[in-house]
Amino acid sequence: MKYSLQFSDAIHVLAYIEMFQDTRSLSSEMIASSIETNAANVRKIMSQLKKSGLIFTKTGKPQPSLAKSPDQISLLDVYRSIEGNTQLIQVDPKTNPNCVVGANIQEALEESYARLQKKAEEEMAKITLDSLIHKIAVLEKEKRPENTGLVERFL
């Protein structure tokens, strides 16, 4: 089963941009080091986020910024920015049409998968970037109290 980490990485990029907005650590290389990916992948994600109106960037300047307040960016916004209209759960389209199960599985799962997609999107719409940044700050304070000064404005 193939799955994408781009959604998670896009949330990471947005949180990093917000949390380090007042620093000079916003180059794609710095963000990539936090995600442990390459800078080209970060630039690709940032391009998609920019096209979706979630961030602002300037060519040649490593100072991206959020286009909206973190409490106005939902996980659904980020998901659609990265994955488009891709369904979270997909049916295998290549099953044996001569088999009782294979000939009917897609149609049998269609309604259930549509309900799951709807519920997942409803839940993603409720979760904001702001709430995730707050959780990151709480966790960092618990794990490394010496960094409280870095995260206190998000607590």
Image: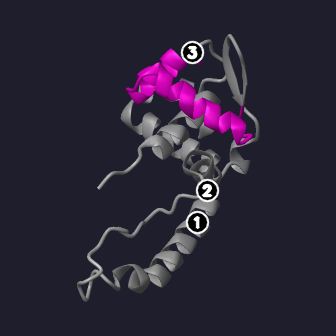
Q: Mark 2 Cα within 10 Å, few/some/many (few <14, many 20+)?
A: some
Tell me which segment is drawn in magenta: 26-55
Seen from this angle, which residue lies furthest front? Answer: 98
53 drawn magenta: yes
Separation (CA) of disc 1 from disc 2: 6 Å
Which three-letter amino acid code belongs to the residue tagged 3?
Answer: Ser
Residue receiving disc 1: 121
Q: Residue shown at 62%/37% (left/top)?
A: 48
Q: Secondary structure at mark 3?
A: loop
Mark 3–mark 1 CB contact (< 8 Å) = no
Q: Which residue is mark 2?
A: 76
Whether tag 1 and tag 2 are in contact, CB under 8 A, the answer is: yes
Q: Quadrant of residue 150?
A: top right
The answer to whether residue 109 is visible is yes
**Nearest to viewer (mark 3 / mark 1):** 1
Q: Is residue 76 above or below residue 57?
A: below
Amino acid tagged 1: Glu
Residue placed most toward the observer, 74 or 104: 104
